[in-house]
Amino acid sequence: MVVTLQLRQTEVQPGQCLILREISWAEFEAILEELGEHRATRVAYYQGLLEIRMPSPEHEVDKELIGDMVKILLDELQLDWEPYGSTTLKRSQMAAGVEPDTCFYIQNAGQIIGKRRLDLLVDPPPDLVIEIDVTSKTQLSAYVALGIPEFGVTEMASCEYLS
């Protein structure tokens, strides 16, 4: 017997992850659509493995602090930059999609100014992504597949896996 559940039937608590295996690209896209754009959860998808993470309040404080430090540093270095926060970055050809804690365009800022939607088939990936805690190596593999040149992992944290 096959059991089918809808995402609205699941709940991910702060600091936890829901792991879904054997998810096709089409299913990943449908899940993103169902989750919507205005949500607290973050997703990471790589070659059929989908993580849905719920950041903890501690995580969010650290994310803001480190993001602000990066902005200050970029301003002090008098570099042009564009913040893209936790924008969904995805490429179907690589079977990879992630939502970083925050990301920045620095070298490619001029190409991105004014864009409200990214398409990694034509737009460059962000120059820097920040992940505050790592719940698995899935995210890192996805970032490499997406061609992200720099990513920072600032804290190793445990996460309960639900599968």
Image: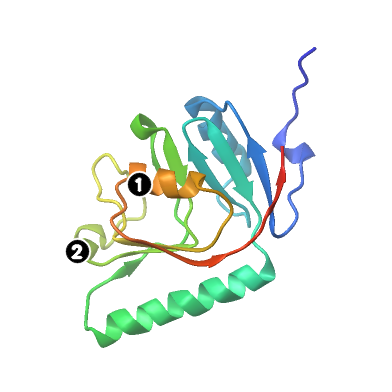
Q: Earlier in the sequence, mark 2 or mark 1?
A: 2
The amino acid marked with disc number 1 is: Val
The amino acid marked with disc number 2 is: Gly
Q: Which label lies toward us, 2 or 1?
A: 1
Distance from Cα at disc 2 to Cα at disc 1? 23 Å
Residue of label 1:
144
Image quadrant where residue 120 sits: top left
Can residue 89 be seen by looking at this rendering?
no
91 sits to left or right of 113: right
- Dot label at residue 110: 2
Q: Report the number of numbered marks.
A: 2
Residue located at (52% from left, 25% from top): 24
Q: Is residue 69 above or below residue 160?
A: below
Residue located at (56% from left, 28% from top): 23
Report helix, strand or loop for mark 2. helix
157 sits to left or right of 103: right
Residue 42, image x, y percentages = 57, 52
Residue located at (55% from left, 50% from top): 37
Q: Is residue 34 above or below residue 68?
A: above
